[in-house]
Image (tube, rainbow, N blue to C red):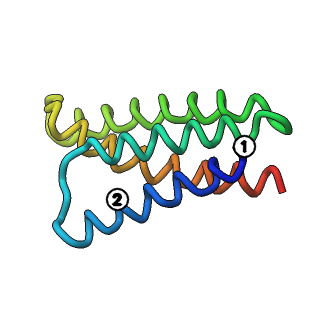
Amino acid sequence: MLVVAYAVPLVMLVVLGGLVLRSHYSHNFFYFLAILLDLIAIGVITAGKAPNYLFVVLFCAVLVALLVVCLLLVRDGDLLFTTYWAWLARLLAAAATIWWVCAILLTI
């Protein structure tokens, strides 16, 4: 199960990177799928050594979402949901990937 937690998010990130580079992929589905796979992998990887790490990551994800709202409200003056979901998907995908790598390094 641990090998799957290492491999599946990596494969998803390669697929997502290929979509973005090849066709300027702008839909949010694969970004949120990558985030979900990263969070599941973080839960599996850190279950034994640091069980609270997943909750710290989820708390940070909420903070990222609130910061995106604040940035969009300051910049645009209103909350456009299409812009919000696009920003949130990309920022959380990058953050979840960093947290996944940190979870791997934490358990080594």
Residue bearing mark 1: 45
CA gap between label 2 and label 1 equals: 22 Å
Amino acid type at mark 2: Leu
Nearest the viewer among 49 and 56 is 49
Nearest the viewer among 83 and 89 is 89
Tag 2–tag 1 contact (CB < 8 Å): no
Could you tell me residue 82's position as x and y percent? 15, 36
Amino acid type at mark 1: Ile
- Quadrant in the picture for the C terminus: bottom right
Q: Which mark is residue 60?
A: none
Nearest the viewer among 37 and 4 is 4
Q: Secondary structure at mark 2?
A: helix
Could you tell me residue 95's position as x and y percent? 50, 49
Rendered image quadrant of residue 48: top right
Q: Residue at x 65, y 27 (%)?
A: 55
Could you tell me residue 93's position as x and y percent? 42, 49
Q: Is residue 10 above or below residue 22?
A: above
Q: Is residue 14 above or below residue 1?
A: below
Q: Residues within 10 Å of mark 2 (few under 14, many from 20)?
A: some
Q: Secondary structure at mark 1?
A: helix
Residue bearing mark 2: 16
Residue extending farthest bottom: 22
Rendered image quadrant of residue 23: bottom left
